[in-house]
Image (spheres, rainbow, N blue to C red):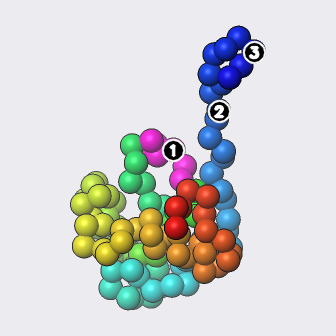
Amino acid sequence: MSLTGQPVSQKPPPPIRDKAHLDFVRGKPCLICGRKPSEAHHVRLSLRTMGKRVCDSKCVNLCAEHHRNLHSLGNEKLFWLPLPGGPLKHAAQLWHERTGEWPEWWDA
């Protein structure tokens, strides 16, 4: 609360940028088919992230074909339905594997 009794709006922290993590993600095989090389895809499952930059901690590994298919489908939730646990679980595991810490957005 502010001094006037009004709620204080807090700006969300800026998205994490981590080139080493993106390189780590690209070094993994595709989550869908297991092919290499892969690309780092920033998971955007929330409307709040549409048009905004997403933290590098929310990246998963996809081959070029599946990355292109995901973007051409235009429905990220539908694309991820067959993946057990969903993409954010995998993104959190990748972040933890590389850094030893769970991302702040993940409730493990």
Residue at image location 25% in from the left, 73% down from the top: 82
Q: Nearer the viewer, mark 1 or mark 3?
A: 3
- Principal secondary structure, stretch drawn in magenta: loop
Q: What secondary structure is found at the residue carrying circle 2?
A: loop
Q: Which residue is mark 1?
A: 52
Kind of residue at badge 3: Leu
Label 1 element class: loop
Mark-to-mark CA distance, 2 and 1: 17 Å
**Residue 40 in view:** no
Q: What are the residue bounds of the magenta stretch?
A: 48-54
Check if residue 49 falls in the magenta segment. Answer: yes
Of labels 2 and 1, the one closer to you: 2
Distance from disc 3 to disc 2, alpha carbons, whole Å, reads 15 Å
Rate crowding at label 2 as few (under 14), some (14 to 19) or many (20 or more) other CA atoms within 10 Å.
Answer: few
**Residue 42 at x, y percent in the picture:** 48, 61
Residue beneath the point at 63% across and 16% down? 6
Horizontally, residue 91 falls left or right of residue 86, namely: right
The kind of residue on which mark 2 rests is Gln
Image mark count: 3
Residue 65 visible, this orientation: yes
Drawn side of residue 89 relative to residue 86, left or right: right
Distance Cα–Cα, label 1 vs label 3: 32 Å
Q: Is residue 84 above or below residue 29?
A: above
| Residue 79 % position (x, y) | 27, 65
- Kindly identify which residue carries mark 2: 10
